[in-house]
Amino acid sequence: MANHSQLGFQDASSPIMEELMQFHDHALMVALAICSLVLYILTVMLTEKLSSSSVDAQEIELVWTILPAVVLIVLALPSLRILYMMDEINEPDLTLKAIGHQWYWTYEYTDLKELTFDSYMVPTSDLPLGHFRLLEVDHRVIVPMNSKVRVIVTADDVLHSWAVPSLGVKTDAIPGRLNQTAFLASRPGVYYGQCSEICGANHSFMPIVVESTPLANFENWSSLIPS
């Protein structure tokens, strides 16, 4: 999770988030090159005397038409690739349904024996020592590590958004509609998120906690949950 002085992204814990961070760095390098070129041109125009140039106006127009097109292609190709990777959900190992309510989440493990539970934020007065205020819940989402998890997201009342930054997922929960996303947790750990849609007075009090664990531990956990 993010710390108080962190300015960048959280550490990537899924292949999709790693791709998103690499594209972010790629786009920043392109933006840096553009800003450097514009700054250089402005500096030259302010410091040098204006004089007639041997460069034809049509050649200049050709350059400033082709150059932006090349920049757009350099940005669009990797972006489209990542969008395709995020949208493609083939043969998931586990399907999880997340239902947003005012103001808590309900989770259904549709592949298991009707495993369903509600997930509420733990009040500050009941928070165990060492846990995070406004982020910890009474029932975490447990998923197996290195397994592709499909998440079907919907809402029961108003708009919500199921978002876990370190896993690279953010999907709107819309009443009467099923949206889906997928992630693969590449390492064990606990990942925190929150509802990213302004859904009402207690919008900031419906956190999301995903715990990635080895497959054997996940099977033991699911067998202990009463049907």
Image (cartoon, helix red, strand yellow):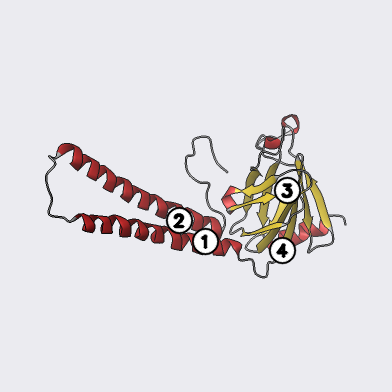
N-terminal of the pair, mark 2 or mark 1, is: 2
For label 4, the crowd category at 10 Å Cα-Cα, with few meaning under 14, some 14 to 19 and many 20 or more, is: some
Identity of the residue drawn at 71% across and 35% down: 200
Real-space Cα distance between discs 4 and 1? Answer: 22 Å
Residue depicted at x 65% and y 64%: 147
Per the model, the C-alpha gap separating discs 2 and 3 is 31 Å
Circle 3: is it few (<14), some (14-19), or many (20+) Cα within 10 Å?
A: some
Amino acid at circle 1: Ile
Position above or below: 89 against 200: below
In screen coordinates, is 49 left or right of 176? left
Instruction: Report, in whole angstroms, how far the alpha carbon at label 3 lies from the one at label 4.
Output: 16 Å
Res 138 → quadrant: top right
**Which quadrant holds the C terminus?**
bottom right
Task: Give x and y (percent) for residue 85.
Answer: 56, 64
* Quarter of the view holding residue 67: bottom left
Residue designated by label 1: 82
Residue type pointed to by label 4 = Leu
Residue that numbered label 2 is attached to: 23
Callout 2 touching callout 1 (CB < 8 Å): yes
Name the residue type under label 2: Phe
The reply to whether the C-beta atoms of the residues labelled 2 and 3 are less than 8 Å apart is no
Residue found at x 74% / y 29%: 125
N-terminal of the pair, mark 4 or mark 1, is 1
Distance (Cα) linking label 4 and label 2: 28 Å
Q: Closer to the camera: disc 4 or disc 2?
A: 2
- Tag shown at residue 140: 3
Give residue 102's mark.
none
SS under mark 4? strand
